[in-house]
Amino acid sequence: MNPFLAQEAQRRLVLASASARRREILERLGFEFEVLVTGVEEEAQGCDDDERFAVMLAERKAREARSRRPEKTIIAADTIVVCGGRRLGKPRDAAEAAAMLAMLSGREHEVITGIALIGPSGRSLARAERTKVYFRSLTPNEIALYVATGEPFGKAGAYAIQGFAAPFVERIDGCYFNVVGLPVRLLFSMFSELERNGA
């Protein structure tokens, strides 16, 4: 149990996400939880607002998990990367991963994570966190070497800031954990708000 949240808020937690990074963050924070992978497609047709897009996907995952675990507290999240007005999802292959990294090279991009939280009573919250990330210029060889590690796959924007891509990052403006995939400060704030509202 995490000492900074009421134990009641931490009981019967479900993480509606397949992300190993989100799982690791929650484990390091002392949470005990069940992982429940949903079948929600990571698409939101007709949604032009990037923040709303991320929140919508998180809400869909949370609702599906809630339908399967109605007595639990559900945490769901979805992270997107936006560069030059284009959303970068998870690369389908090595060529797409290399193209994404080439796009990010020497540029600023934004990482947006939507979080949805549903308490046992059915009360729900949905919020988003935004972080700006600045990459240094990457050489074609660096991109090829990074893609060859296999790390870009399964990650929005084709990189993991906490992994081999760490040297690519010149600086960030905002929450580091948001770039990893789960903004911790926002999550705790949402837990507190849910508790104040009677979960």
Image: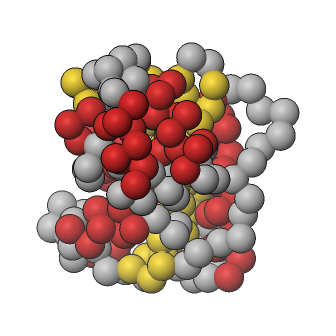
Residue 105 position (above or below residue 189): above
User: In the rendered view, does 42 fall on the left or right side of 147?
Assistant: right
User: Total number of numbered labels?
Assistant: 0
Q: Which of 61 and 146 is in front in this view?
A: 146
Q: Nearer the viewer, residue 31 or 109?
A: 109
Residue located at (51% from left, 69% from top) = 18
Q: Which of 87 and 143 is in front in this view?
A: 143
Residue at the front extreme, as displayed: 141
User: In the rendered view, does 166 fall on the left or right side of 33?
Assistant: left
User: In the rendered view, does 35 fall on the left or right side of 52?
Assistant: left
Give the x, y percent position of residue 190: 41, 50
Q: Nearer the viewer, residue 106 or 61?
A: 106
Residue 181 appearing in the image: no
Colour convention of the picture: secondary structure
Quadrant the N terminus occupies: bottom left
Q: Can you tell which quarter of the image residue 30 is in? A: bottom left
Residue 113 appearing in the image: yes
Residue at the right extreme, as displayed: 46
Residue located at (53% from left, 34% from top) = 100
Give the x, y percent position of residue 34: 45, 82
Residue 86 position (above or below residue 142): above
Give the x, y percent position of residue 95: 58, 44
Give the x, y percent position of residue 112: 49, 36
Residue 142 position (above or below residue 20): above
Residue located at (62% from left, 63% from top) = 62
